[in-house]
Image: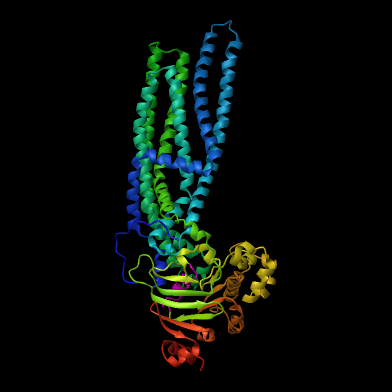
Amino acid sequence: MAIRARAQDPRPPAGGDASADEETRGGDQFDPLAYVQSGVRAQKSLRGLPRLASSALRLARRADPRLFYISTALQLANAGIMSAQILLAKVAIERVLSQAGGGGSVGVVLPPLIAMIAVTALGGLAASSQVHLQRLLGEEVQRLTWTSILDVTTRVPLETFESPDFFDDLQRVRANALLRPVTLAQGLIGLVGGVFGAVGLSIALFVVKPILLPVLLAGGLPLWLLSRRTGRIEFNFRTGQTPQLRLRWYLTELLCGRNEAKEIRAFGLGPVVFGRWDDNYREYLDDYRRHIRRRVWLSGLSALVTTVVMSVSLGILVWLIVERRIGLAGAGAGLIAIRLLGGQLGQVFSGVGDLFESALFLGDFDAFVADNTPAEQDAVSRARPVAPFTELAVENVCFRYPGTRGDTLHDVSLTLRAGEVVALVGENGSGKTTLAKLLAQLFEPTCGRILWDGVDARELDGERLRSNVGVIFQDFVRYQLSARENVGFGRAEAIDDLAAIAAAARLGGAHDYLSRLPDGYDTSLGKEFVGGYDLSIGQWQRVALSRAFFRDAGFLVLDEPTASLDARSEHELFEYVQDLAAGRCLLLISHRFSTVRSADRIYVMHGGEIVEEGNHDELMLLDGRYAELFELQAQAYR
């Protein structure tokens, strides 16, 4: 499965060739230069408000079309209600003044007053509903955002996670996805509502007295510029603070994490790490104080501009009254219109500011989803059936992790057959786990090919291939969920088949203690949630093995399957290894030579290459690297 190509990073890779572990860790590192550069690029988009508004509208409409259209209808209704209030107020005041001389009828005044009260109440209900719908729309946009992000992370090829560029993009989008969708929805609703309201009030004000309208609209220009400046300042501040924020999150996890707590205490690192966290936070607060001072100054300037505009408008209104160019009823309606229109213009500029602040989120989100959308496989590949293989052949395969100069695997060739137990051995960094990921169809070779019963794996549907592979790695996941799910995730479609889950747990040696838990297989494992029962590392590994066995796949890959097992458990596991291999292929990766000596065939890896091949006796007679490593381990028991 391929993804759309990203632009090449012009910076050369740092340092020389790295091991697979180093490359994986490199994905956690954040490049502040690249992030700031992306912020500068995104900042140019602040000039394109129409593009931002269009993107925001599409996102909100996709999140919940019905809710979006209801919100839009309420905005239109609010605009009409405010216009009606102005015109009804003018009529009501005229009726009151006409009856002020005495002898008038209350019935003449009541209809416009009652209509104005009813319209005002309706406006209050619409505004209140709009607040709640705005919050709900924000949550819907956030859900859509996370859906798109998680769709990318669960579908892109595994090697994509080895790219620092991808990981930086992912981390940045994840951080923004928590709050920016809500800000985006608020800004969008504020902008749409403000525009509709301003148009409606402008029409009403034009009806009352046209000369007042240009004054208010001209006064809005400085507010527009100030709102744009405010959004730019907020954008720059958030962009510059992201590297420090990520470091602070990481330090917080170190100080709060259950797994990290042991080492933090054992080495007395609490004061040191806390001091680093505190320094980081103090530096952030110093920057934030300067940022707030600038925001307050701009807010004060905006308030001054608003005051000046309102004062000029009121001054013109007073002059019109004195010169008898407007009646008291028109003046009263004009006064209300000026006040409401000023609020609507403020809402427009506030919405614009929120959209500007969301520019980075919008740009990152759109680019992240577009750049990492997996390409669809052709119909022939999807339709071709994939059965458990009889023979899996690796021909001259090499593999290079993204962002590195050198290959991790070089010209690797081997053959696996159904019914065999095959072992991979070698020192750390020799490429065993990388090769296992290629065989399990988690990576694609950089060169060479892998043949599944004579057919290039690239021509077959990846999901169907992986359904025939059961793999458990040394760094297996400990799901903080029920025991049933921890085993059943090996074949999620059969997760309700408790009898099959229990049978797999028996094979993995986990059934005895899982069945004795308070709620049996429905007991939550781990200490993450209330009521959970934690297991020893050896027990967790048996659960992971059970998950692989529950896969019931034709090809099982076990990476260091006995690393955390005691001697008795290890012996019991390998007593029935041959039984596990019946009708299927079993690939073992292990540093324990006592574990692999009974394998049908052993491949010895060194420096990303296969340097020796044979069974235990043949390799011992060869007196090469395998024999050397075997003797080194054997000496420890003599």
Say if the magenta span includes residue 437: yes
Residue 423 place in picture, x, y as percent: 50, 81
Question: Residue lying farthest top?
Answer: 103
Quick check: 402 left or right of 390? left
Confirm whether residue 542 shows in the render.
Answer: yes
Quick check: 27 left or right of 538? left
In the foreground, 207 or 278: 207
In the foreground, 626 or 241: 626
In the foreground, 553 or 57: 553
Quick check: 85 left or right of 363? right
Picture quadrant where residue 477 is located? bottom right
Q: Is residue 178 above or below residue 508?
A: above
Q: Which residues are magenta?
A: 428-441
Please tell me which residue is depicted at 40% across the width and 44% down the height of the picture.
357
Residue 389 place in picture, x, y as percent: 53, 72
Say if the magenta span includes residue 634: no
Q: Is residue 86 above or below residue 272?
A: above
Quick check: 108 left or right of 503? left
- The coloring applied to the image is rainbow
Looking at the rendered image, the quarter that the N terminus falls into is bottom left
Please tell me which residue is depicted at 59% across the width and 23% down the height of the picture.
118
Residue 618 place in picture, x, y as percent: 47, 90
Residue 469 place in picture, x, y as percent: 54, 69
Confirm whether residue 312 shows in the render.
Answer: no
How many numbered markers are drawn? 0
In the foreground, 317 or 615: 615
Question: Residue lying farthest bottom?
Answer: 638
